[in-house]
Amino acid sequence: MNQSLLVEEKTYSTPAQWDLFEKIQEHEQVLFCNDPATGLKAIIAIHDTTLGPGLGGTRMREYETVDDALEDALKLSKGMTYKNAAADINFGGAKGVIIGDPAKDKTPELFRAYGQFIESLNGRFYTGTDMGTTLEDFVHASMETGCIAGLPKEYNGGGETSIPTALGVLYSIKAVARLLWEDENVSGKSFSIQGLGKVGFKVAEHLLHEGANLYVTDIDAGLVNQIVELGEKKGHHVTAVTGDDIYQVDADVFVPCAVGGTVNPKTIEQLKVKAIAGAANNQLSDDSCAALLKEKGILYAPDYMVNSGGVIQVSDELYGPNQQRVLQKTKTIYHTLLDVLHQAQSDNVTTTDAANLICENRIEGRKNRNSFFSPKKRPKWQVRF
Ligand SMILES: NC(=O)C1=CN([C@@H]2O[C@H](COP(=O)(O)OP(=O)(O)OC[C@H]3O[C@@H](n4cnc5c(N)ncnc54)[C@H](O)[C@@H]3O)[C@@H](O)[C@H]2O)C=CC1
Ligand SMILES: O=C(O)CCC(=O)C(=O)O
């Protein structure tokens, strides 16, 4: 072996050089998007496209480090693979994160630049709203790419995904109630809701309509006040709670609807609830939390099943927007989730393990069926060619 090859071997086998590839080893592709002209800094992670093109929303958030942003994109996109498999739709898992403050850093040009990067993936990534992004942002992105889902109705899209997502959370809560109390009626039961944004606010409205009592928190005091006032009008108790106190309230069900990771060993110790069912993606800080919850007797409804109303709508757009049909499909979450909760009980495993197994079997099964070549692997709403 000549000297230069020896040097190369030595250089490239240093473990630190491979850290990044180790981090993304479960993923098919990760795209770092950098556009100095608009200030766009984004990461698109495509986890698995066995079931179809990668599909997942794009989040905008002020991350402290690029590593934090990458970790979020990797975890969220993997979650989408499971979510899409659980919802039995023909899409794989992917997600985008834009690094920046949604209140200060958004411009139409930034989203157009993001659209150009999406377009460069040539149909491998479809996206729409998530935390910190709105339908309007994606109207700008859609000027550059056809791979945008969930545009406003005026643009012939399905509109706000938080509507089916919130309905799916309500039906999941009903499934949990059926398992806990043999009755899906939640009137008089109490719920602690963390986050009153696009989804959490609607979940709170649904629960008030059902006659439930609420504890609510959000870093935006205006949203908290609105729900407190609504509760007063409806004659139900809505108690505003500050920050981390939400983990200690004496509610029946914790409903995380803000950021991920809020169910962790520290908060599990504080939680007094009987169950957790909410919209936030990646609620558990790590896999071991599922076992901790099981030990403590807290029933955990896997997040990616509870919050699949959004992808159900987005994938349904293949047939043209139809909210009635989407809401009907969203209600099926009740039975899918209840089956998983029963399965976990009868197998004495965590609810996460029971749900993951169903998804992994579905993906494995599809791998076998995808064994022959077909050029028609694009969803039919892809109209650019
Ligand atoms: N929008 C959708 O259709 C879907 C959303 N999700 C997930 O649901 C969660 C909420 O999504 P959206 O409502 O769309 O986002 P959003 O950005 O509209 O709302 C998030 C809310 O959480 C609040 N918040 C942030 N950190 C908080 C904290 N530490 N404590 C209390 N409140 C806090 C924010 O002030 C905001 O009001 C996210 O995790 C998202 O990924 C999942 C599936 C679909
Ligand atoms: O809005 C979308 O494009 C898909 C929904 C999504 O990202 C999610 O369920 O987390």
Image (tube, grey):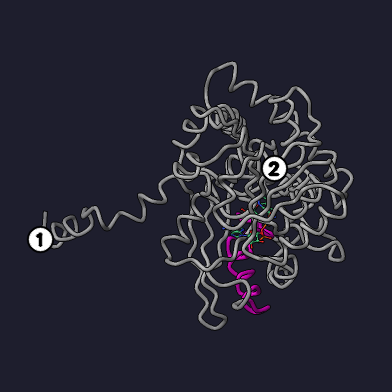
* Image point (77%, 57%), residue name: 227
Which mark is drawn over residue 191?
2
Q: Compare marks 1 and 2 and give the one earlier in the sequence.
A: 1
- Against 47, residue 30 (above or below) is below
Tell me: 153 left or right of 102: right
Residue 255: percent from the left, percent from the top? 65, 44
SS for callout 2: strand
Nearest-to-viewer mark from 1 and 2: 2
Residues rendered magenta in the picture = 106-132
Is 11 placed left or right of 276 in the picture?
Answer: left
How packed mark 1 is, by other alpha carbons closer than 10 Å (few <14, some 14-19, many 20 or more), is few
Q: Amino acid at mark 2?
A: Phe
Q: Quadrant of residue 12?
A: bottom left
Residue 240, horizontal then vertical, whole percent: 68, 56
Residue furthest to the top? 346
Examine the structure image and report whether residue 24 is included in the region drawn in magenta. no
